Image (tube, grey):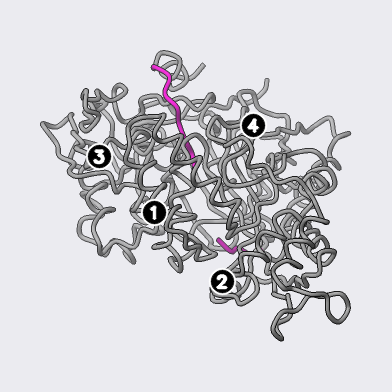
Amino acid sequence: MSARSIRGLAAATLAAALTVGAAACSNPDSAAAGKNGDGDSAVVGIAYEPESLSPLLGYGKDGNAKIFDGLLALDRGMNLEPALAAALPKISEDRLTYTYKLRRGVTFSDGEPFGAKDVVFTYRTILDKKTNNPSKSELDAIKDVRATGEDTVVFTLKYPYAPFAERTVLPIVPEHVVAGQDVNTGPFTTKPIGTGPYVLTGWSKGEKISLKANPHYWGGEPKVKKFTMAVIKDDDVRATRLRAGDLDGAILPPNLAKGFKGDRAKKTYAATTYDYRTVTLPTHNRVAGVTAIRQALDVAVDRQTMVDKILEGAGKPAYGPVPTGSEWFTRGTERPHDLARAKKILGDAGWKPGKNGIREKNGVRAAFPLWYLAGDKLRQEHALAYASDAKKAGIAVTTQAGTWEVIEPRMKDDAVLAGGGAPADPDFDQYLLLTSSFGGDGFNNMARYDNPAVDAALVEGRKSGDKAVRKAAYDTVQRELVKNPGYTFLTHIDHLYVVADRWDGLTTQVEPHDHGLASGPWWNVEDWTPKQ
């Protein structure tokens, strides 16, 4: 058992959380891949890569950053454990002050010492208005962060933000390297330096991210000396590369993962997730923005069939960002498939069948486009199933594939088959997804959903330290999504990974939507040991 795992077992249990376009890879580090059976190197296939490797711009904010460490980390059971902090934080009685004692003797990979000043610099820089971090609102609760000596950091909050400790898995950067650079465009964004178990050796955008073990890592040098993440957007190509031996592991959709069932040299790992697939219904679209259309689609869609046929049972129906198995899910907000009800909703609202059965009202045809990411089989299949269900109710949804560069400019008016989801605390996903002020802010609130009751409830849920008050607030959010669903949530997806059976120590965590660098059985690759 690693030193990090031992610390996790000793740490008190706290609820924790985790939380885009790339090209196919040619032949990533095939000499280091599984075909030579070398247990001290691994190459895995992922679907997406980040735009930056700087935590100041959002990279690694939910943990498992490989190159970096946060004050805290998440163990296999999603409990918080100390990382750069020597212990879990001391929290004041009013829950407005968090004090962290730092681990001593830690150095960055360039040999310079880590200290309290680096923690203060990291958080203050992210909160700076000039820093282009799309997730900085996640740290909105911070009123002040300061160092008291070389090994103590104190956070003062504006309000008792219940999941604040989970936010401190955020990676820490070296002030001595970054302070003299442009935080948004400087070399640190592609050539970072951290305290983590691995050191970046190269990043060929659209192809691969190459890492080597940090021999001076405070948690012990990893046994896997070289670790490469090959960026392969297309699911079929990823499966082909894995079968050819160019990859040691990969994330695959269910229909491709089952093709490896008889391969005794490989094992399949399933991770439960908060990862959902949803259709954005843009408020500015004259059809998708209509409440009756939204309500009809919400019950016209056959979620269980999607789980059974598309996911082959590896998932469950989704009625919102919160999975039905979560303690935060609001019972009674399930929307069963009911085509007759969908037709009645549309008819009562004045949408009458027209040419080819597609409904019309005041000369407007009930039709809109739905985009999905090219090469993503699961999104494509969800989009096609959604369009088929919608057509049965008299709504014409035209599916189109594209890259994010093509899709993003169209998100204001066109629907998108999107994904999201973050475990543990409902604030982590719902606040950015549904708050009206985030409409049009990149991939936050892609539908530009605007509901004052939801806005107010999200603020109450975020600022209250009382769990009962928070539960009531998120109940309000989920009930409002029944009344006016700005998104049609479809499924929560289990992630499937196929990996060469050459190492011990592989496990999975409860995963967020972001399944690539931070998630998968390689979330703890620093703890793997080659099989003898």
Q: CA distance from mark 1 to mark 4?
A: 37 Å
Give the labeled residue for mark 1.
135
Which residue is label 2 attached to? 411
- Disc nearer the start of the sequence (1/3): 1
Give percent across and percent down for residue 516: 58, 47
Residue under pointer 4: 39
Q: In the rendered structure, which amino acid carries the disc numbered 2?
A: Met
Q: Which secondary structure, mark 2?
A: loop
Residue 486 bears which disc, if any?
Answer: none
Local SS, label 4: loop
Q: Secondary structure at mark 1?
A: loop
User: Which residue is depicted at the point 32% across and 32% down?
Assistant: 465
Q: Earlier in the sequence, mark 1 or mark 4?
A: 4
* Magenta stretch encompasses residue 138: no
Q: Earlier in the sequence, mark 2 or mark 3?
A: 3
Region rendered in magenta: 12-23
Give the distance between the C-alpha atoms of the residues marked 2 and 3, in whole angstroms: 34 Å
Question: Residue 400 lies in what quarter of the image?
Answer: bottom right
Where does the image place residue 406, in percent across and percent down from the top left? Answer: 60, 75
| Outermost residue toward the top in this view | 10
In this rendering, position of residue 476 left or right of residue 500: left
Amino acid marked by disc 4: Gly
Image quadrant of residue 195?
A: top left
Q: Amino acid at mark 3?
A: Tyr
Q: Please tell me the numbered disc located at residue 159.
A: 3
- Which three-letter amino acid code belongs to the residue tagged 1? Ser
